[in-house]
Image (spheres, rainbow, N blue to C red):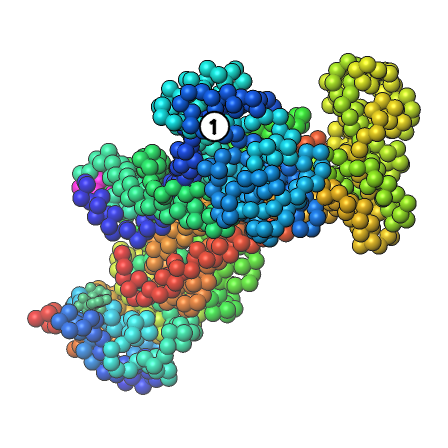
Amino acid sequence: MTTITSFRSAVTAQGLTKVYGSGDAAVHALRGIDVEFATRAFTAIMGPSGSGKSTLMHCLAGLDSVTDGHVSIGDVEITRLNDKRLTMLRRERVGFIFQAFNLLPTLTAEQNILLPLQIAGRQPDQALFDRVIDTVGLRDRLRHKPSQLSGGQQQRVAVARALISKPEVIFADEPTGNLDSRSGAEVLSFLRTSVRELGQTIVMVTHDPVAASYADRVVFLRDGLLVRELEQPTPQTVLDTLVALEA
Amino acid sequence: MFRTTIAGLLAHRLRLLLTSLAIILGVGFIAGTFVLTDTIDAGFSQSFTAAADKIDVAVLAKDEENPLPPSLLAKVGSVAGVKDAQPVVSGEAALIGKDGKTIGELVTAGVAFPSYRMDLTSGSAPVSDGEAVVDTNTAKTEGFRIGDTIAVLDDKNARHEFRLVGTFDVGVDQSLAARGAVAYTPATAMRMTGAKGYAEIDVTTAGPSRESLRTAIAAVAGSGATVQTGEELASDLAASNGASTEYLKIGLLLFGVVALLVAGLVIYNTFGILVAQRMRELALLRCIGATRRQVFGSIVLESTIVGLVSSVLGLGAGLGMGGLAVFLLNTFSPDVEVPTGTVTLSPQTIVIGLATGLIMTVVAALLPARQATKVAPVAALRTQTEEHTFRTGVVRIVFAVIFGLAAAGLTYMGVTAKPDESALMTVMAGGILAFFSVLILGPVLVTPLSGLAGWLPGRLFGVPGRLATENSRRNPKRSATTTIALTIGVTLMTFMAVLTATMRATADQELDSQFVADYRVAAQTGDVPHAVAEALRGHPELATVAEFREAEGRLDDKDYPIGTVTSSVLESTMRPKATSGSTDGFKPGTVMIADYVAEHLKIKVGDDVRIGTEKDATPLRVVAILDSESLLPSITVPEQFFAERFGKVDDNQILIIAADGADQDKARAIVDNAAQPYPAVKVTSSTEIRDQFDDAIGGILSVITGLLGLAIVISLLGIANTLSLSVHERTRESALLRALGLKRGQLRGMLTIEALILGLVGALVGTVLGIVYGWAATETIAESVSFQLPVGQILLFIAASGLAGVLAAVLPARRAARTSIVGSLASD
Ligand SMILES: Nc1ncnc2c1ncn2[C@@H]1O[C@H](COP(=O)(O)OP(=O)(O)OP(=O)(O)O)[C@@H](O)[C@H]1O
Ligand SMILES: [Mg+2]
């Protein structure tokens, strides 16, 4: 535990509040969240449906504006950036893996993987590329279009894409939500490997206690509030915590 | 099912808006054409009725060559029941302008008609021999005022002066409006124009009905006259004018049909895309029990509603466009008097407008509707919509090849055939088949072509450029239909540009080779007095002065005009082309004959033909058959021979070549001075002729281009429509790209480049088709044309198409860039 918190924080949120709509129709999705995500750590965000997980992730990643509070990625406070700066920040420092529709259908797997680098006008690191490709086991699929890949393969392409630009943090929203348990396990262990071996920082939203158990730490949300944390989770401890929260 | 259709329509109303606009424009143009021509027709018949209202019975000469004998006037006047009978005289008498030369291109009309028919705008009608009135337009352009003295040449070119006592409006008489008119008393008019009789006698009744008076007058009028009541006269006149608006109508409708065709393609594409996007929805309907027929019906119903609503709006647009056209005609072309009735939608216009709009929309939606019935219910269960993979089918290739071969065959036949109308028709048929071939092959062509068009943007704009190229070819069928709509307009524009450029170049070349003369002197009426040529000779500034003369004569006992030319012309640069024989052998005792005369009479070089007058003909040896485009008289004899047979004949025309290096202004002044004493003798220069021709052709081209512009606008709506539907379809993709770091501007740029590529592809195909068929068409127009590629214009078309595509992308691109990333990622 101490070993993990002693790392510098990759992402920090203070008093993070998000309100959708206004007046009677206002939905308080986040009600003042203070949280830190350590570098070189794999953190899972859990909570019941509607508890604000996706909203939190979007706010942390600078995809959505916040109503109140501060978010920093590394030493940059993103809540004060305009759209253009945010875009540049995403290019340079953030990677994404979504639940579905991760890939551009017109591009091959390889082109999809290299897309963020090309957008940023950066040269791919060939050694890293080879390593990533071999780890995700996609070498023989590089020339295929997404429609020719299975759901698990598509997600692995998305993971490879997120890794290739060496972002400071990767946000993943239910990356295994659409996968069966075996492909899910592949993707998750790959994510964990990238944290351990490549020193990547990953923040992942998930519903699945097993998926969460791949993480170093789990934070629990309920009704827009951070209510519990678990270090070194196992499926059982996660499940127990969830059951306790529901009660 | 009806309820879901309506709900669907409302849900997609924004997407259908552009489609509706395409239909509205197409129907509007067609309806507008009818509104315009109806309004003109109504205006004509109104003013004819108004004019004829004052006439109870009119006696008309059956043909213009044989006017009514003057003696008939008294006979008609003495018929019982006739209150008043007055003659109408119609002829020509050249009015001399303030510059001392006769006015205008055409000889001024000299007329007389009853004062009650004269629409005086100022002053009074002529009552004595020394008085005349001028039409308002001529008075204005020439600056004539009441009290001025005007000079007019009679039919023998003798000058007479009149006091101007008034101005009058020629009304709807297009021929008077075009020529300008001077009205005199009947006797003076006959004297001035040399008319042998009256064109018409107008009668008013002292009491008897028009019908009975007509019968009574018909009894004395004789067989050379037609007797009509005022009503009959009015409806006849209106009908003959209606025939001319018919041409206008057909011409405009042709463009309307092109516009509708383009609109049809846009509709077809829109429904195709809507169906593709609603696969899930439709499959869901099938899952819960809707039959194929119901799915089909719902799409057809949707198109019917869209078609009907848009057509109704189109009729409104047509009313506006027609009204606008009438207004513009009246405001900007004062010399074309367009009488305007009230601008209205006739029942016929309503029926035609609604029917064309509705039928076209529904027909265009049939194929997409059939596509919709093919949706498998399981499609509802798939999460990710499949990418449209397009495979080039064998059937497609086979059909394209069949059409292509037929097109090539027809075109080849037309091009190699003897130039005439049927050759042109053959080429046009080939062109239509070639277009179909391209239409079928479109999806195959679009992929490499967009690669080509996207090459530069891909280089210049990096990732957005490359993504745009990919996007433009990801759904080849859709892109092909989108671009082919633009192709139609660009093809026709290029075709016209090539045709006119070639015509212009050919005419210029002809002017150069045949009309090498620098100046032409000719008389507006009659001939050029010989003295003019005399005055032109002996000036070092003028190298050649060639007199052309013609007289009525006989060739092998048939009436033919016989002509001659100053022999020095044969040594000058004006030297005519001979299709056989040679002009070198032209000397006393010989003759040269134009090819069309020779062909008709089966005359060859070496034959002897008898030429001269009826009493006295001499055999002459044919030494040359002249190219029909040569300027020489069709039967050219030596000067000496001509003078012996026909005596002193004034010149038909004089062609003049200035000496090399002579001062142009000086040469021109000499020619002008020689012509100066003779009001009817006018000087034109080859540059003036060329400019006039260029102006005329340029005018035609710009009108046609303007009319084709409508088709272009509609096809741009199509591009905008396809793009916005694609943007909608790719909401998630756009969000993903934004999440990965694509800036807003870059996303906008990506869509803009996609539109640019679509526009360029459409324009590329269009210009190729237009150039090929423009060339083929010119080959069928004349034997020797100097083909001219208007490179500048064509590049302009291509650039404009690309730019227009960019314009079409503005709104869709803005919408795409504006949507929030999170919202789009979540959207279903
Ligand atoms: N665009 C929006 N407008 C209004 N309310 C919203 C919007 N997006 C989310 N919400 C609300 O905010 C709350 C949190 O939503 P969020 O999507 O973050 O939940 P979640 O934890 O990700 O749920 P799930 O596990 O179902 O994905 C919910 O009550 C949701 O209804
Ligand atoms: Mg969620």
Q: Which residue corresponds to mark 1? A: B85
Residue in the image at 28% along x and 82% along y = A70
Q: Position of residue B376 (x, y in %)?
A: 27, 39
**Front residue (pair A242, B276):** B276
Q: Residue placed farthest to the left in the image?
A: A247
Q: Where residue B670 appears, x then y in whole percent? A: 82, 49
Residue B526 visible within the image: yes
In this orientation, which residue lies closer to the viewer: B727 or B649?
A: B649
The correct choice, above or below, for B209 with respect to B16 in the image is above
- Along the viewing direction, whichever of B769 and B591 lies nearer the viewer: B591
Q: Quadrant of ligand 2?
A: bottom left
Mark 1 secondary-structure assignment: strand
Quadrant where the image shows the C terminus of chain B: bottom left
The answer to whether residue B147 is left or right of residue A167 is right
Asked whether residue B260 is in view, the answer is: no
Q: Chain of mark 1?
A: B
Q: Residue at x 29, y 41 (%)?
A: B308
Q: Position of residue B176 (x, y in %)?
A: 55, 38
Quadrant in the picture for the N terminus of chain B: top left
Query: In the rendered image of this protein, does residue B826 appear above or below residue A36?
Result: above
User: B530 left or right of B141?
Assistant: right
Residue B15 in the image: above or below residue B405: below
Residue at (63% x, 52% y) in the render:
B792
Give, as a single range, the part of the protein colored magenta: B283-288
Count of numbered circles on the image: 1
Percent position (x, y) of residue B291?
21, 35
